[in-house]
Amino acid sequence: MSGFRNIFDQHDWDAVKASIYAKTSRDVEAALAAGRRTLEDFKALISPAAAPYLEQMAQLSRKLTQQRFGNTMQLYIPLYLSNECQNICTYCGFSLDNKIARKTLSRDEILREVAVIKAMGYEHVLLVTGEANQTVGLDYFREAMQVIRPHFANISMEVQPMDEAEYATLKQDGLHGVLVYQETYHHADYKLHHPKGKKSNFYYRLDTPDRLGRAGVHKIGLGVLIGLEDWRTDSFFTALHLQYLERTYWQTKYSISFPRLRPCSGGLPPKVEMNDRELVQLICAYRILDQEVELSLSTRETPCFRDNVIKLGITALSAGSKTNPGGYATDLSSLEQFEISDERSPEHISGMLRSQGYEPVWKDWDEGY
């Protein structure tokens, strides 16, 4: 099988981890001074040795972000269509073994959600479901796209991985981007956290961005669930994946997200805690490595953290998010996927951005290029 899998299999997790933790201050200084940074430089920038250089990293990251993106911040909102799921995942409120009320939105319910989201000002929506291909498979997505497409400039998805032909069909229906998180690149731990369901197939998920690239999807979002494994090693593999994709599908745009493990029903405590300084370090490291990639921060993070980190490399924020199906139009008791930390309205977030000299962008800006 060609694709990223070949590159991934050439890297041993423990060896990569050891090389990151062996980086020195000299390696960090060399990475900061370099013209073009390599993955070895990225290892130095995410290593413990880089902690004393956080201020320099932040200043450089801010400068590089402004050069590429200016004073703009893209705003997006998730629209949860369904919490039905056939997978067992140790960290997710939608997991099959959680005895919760399941809900999949009908056409009318979707339209009610759309009306509320449009009233907030959004032109870009992210469709989210659990992974239940019997009830929320290709046919359901096509119908949902038909209902939603007239109302938004851009539609992205964070749903179950699909086959290349299915992505090609959805692209014709108006699909703009797909977010697919590997959760962790640690193969054994991945199996531990995904014991049942289609998601337990590590390599099918790993191959998903290749299928998206071949289908010509405009934007691909990557990331891991920070807290499942050593975040530094997982982030290296994410960067390795990103660089492969940028070389192979060079007309596609890419984004990275930083979901830290949040409380959920039947939830899992993080194996590895990442503090705020370390998250800032990681955001800056990605920006210093790659000036083109979009960096996204969700409402999982606190208002104070989000307000302070936007100038350091972030280019996209969610605002006003609800993580349960029907959560915008009605106060349903359907279960949230995880707890929100920043509950401020999009209007409030927009005002905060303007007060910091930023222009909120309500739709995905790529189409304008």
Image (cartoon, grey):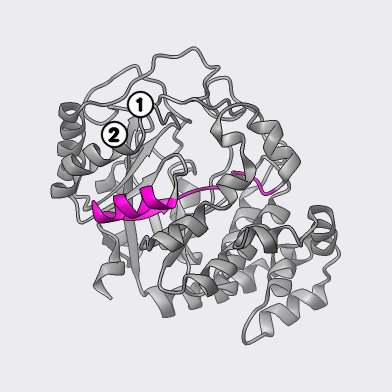
Magenta stretch encompasses residue 167: yes
- Where residue 197 sits: x, y (%)? 56, 28
Residue 111 coordinates in the image, percent (x, y): 16, 34
Residue at 19% over, 38% down: 114
264 to the left or right of 104: right
Closer to the camera, 132 or 351? 132
Q: Position of residue 317 (x, y in %)?
A: 39, 53
Q: Is residue 55 magenta?
A: no
Circle 2 — which element?
Answer: helix
- Label 1 SS: loop
What is the three-letter code of the residue carrying label 2? Tyr
The reply to whether discs 2 and 1 touch (Cβ–Cβ < 8 Å) is yes
Who's the residue at 58% across and 25% down the image?
A: 88
Q: CA distance from mark 2 to mark 1?
A: 7 Å
Q: Is residue 198 visible?
A: yes
Q: Is residue 184 above or below residue 102?
A: below
Give the residue number, with chain letter if any, for mark 2.
140
Q: Residue at x 28, y 76 (%)?
A: 369
Which numbered disc, 2 or 1, marks the residue that appears first in the sequence? 1
- Name the residue nearer the viewer: 107 or 210: 210
Side of 367 where 334 appears, left or right: right
| 234 on left or right of 15 | left
Q: Amino acid at mark 1?
A: Thr
Give the residue at mark 1: 135
The picture places residue 323, in percent across and down from the top left corner, at: 38, 32
Magenta region: 164-185
In this picture, is 147 found above or below 167?
above
Picture layout, residue 189 above or below residue 63:
above
The residue carrying pointer 2 sits among few (fewer than 14), some (14 to 19) or many (20 or more) residues within 10 Å by Cα, namely some
Query: Residue at coordinates 41% horizontally, 21% vertically from top-left?
Result: 335
